[in-house]
Amino acid sequence: MSPDWQLAIAYNAALQIAVAALAVSGYRASRESHHFRAIQSLKHTIGLDSASIDLFDSFRKKRNIGGYERAGTVSEQETKEMVALAQKLRKDVEEWLRVYHPELFRE
């Protein structure tokens, strides 16, 4: 699988995690700038740091180029970084859910 596709898959996983955190908080991103708003909301939902949000947003832009304009623009290193970010985000949101919304888990 190409690095472009790998980045897109990891990005989409992370985006769904952001959307889930937003939904649990009682909100949803508008259709206009949906991805941007979902990413930015992480500051307010789980308190994600600005550096991680900026990195996530840079991958949003990179994914758009690779997905809509031209292929082959994503490096393997960028793919690894996006996968690591998605994994970190999953862990952070799960911890946040366990603290603030424990009713969503069966123990």
Image (cartoon, rainbow, N blue to C red):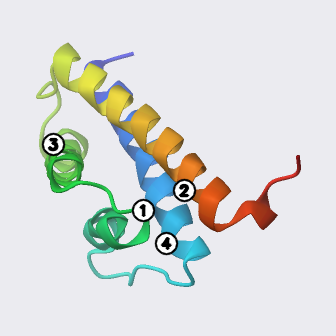
Return the residue nearer the eye: 56 or 102.
102
Judge left or right: residue 74 versus residue 14.
Answer: left
| Residue 43 in picture, x, y percent from top left | 30, 66
Foreground residue among 12 and 26: 26
Q: Mark 3 points at which residue?
A: 62
How packed is label 1: few (under 14 Cα within 10 Å), some, or many (20 or more)?
many
Secondary structure state at the residue bearing disc 2 = helix
Q: Is mark 1 on a helix, strand or loop?
A: loop
Three-letter amino acid code at the position of disc 3: Lys
Position of residue 83 measured from the top left corner of the image (x, y, whole percent): 37, 28
Give yes or no for contact between labels 1 and 4 (Cβ–Cβ under 8 Å).
no
Q: Indicate which label's residue lies in the foreground, 1 or 4.
A: 1
At 22% from the left and 47% from the top, the residue drawn is 52
Q: How crowded is mark 4: few (under 14 residues within 10 Å), some or many (20 or more)?
A: many
- The picture quadrant where one finds residue 42 is bottom left
How far is mark 3 from mark 2, CA to CA?
A: 28 Å
Which label sits on residue 96?
2
Camera-near label (1 vs 3) is: 1
**CB contact under 8 Å: marks 1 and 2:** yes
Q: How far apart are marks 1 and 2 (CA)?
A: 6 Å
Specify the amino acid type for callout 2: Trp
Q: Mark 1 points at which residue?
A: 46
Snapshot quadrant of residue 33: bottom left
Q: What element carries label 4?
A: helix
Distance between the Cα atoms at labels 1 and 3?
24 Å
Q: Which residue is drawn at 35% across and 38% down?
A: 8
Percent position of residue 61, x then y = 15, 51
In the picture shown, does residue 41 fall above or below 70?
below
Real-space CA distance between mark 4 and mark 3, rounded to the nearest whole angstrom: 23 Å
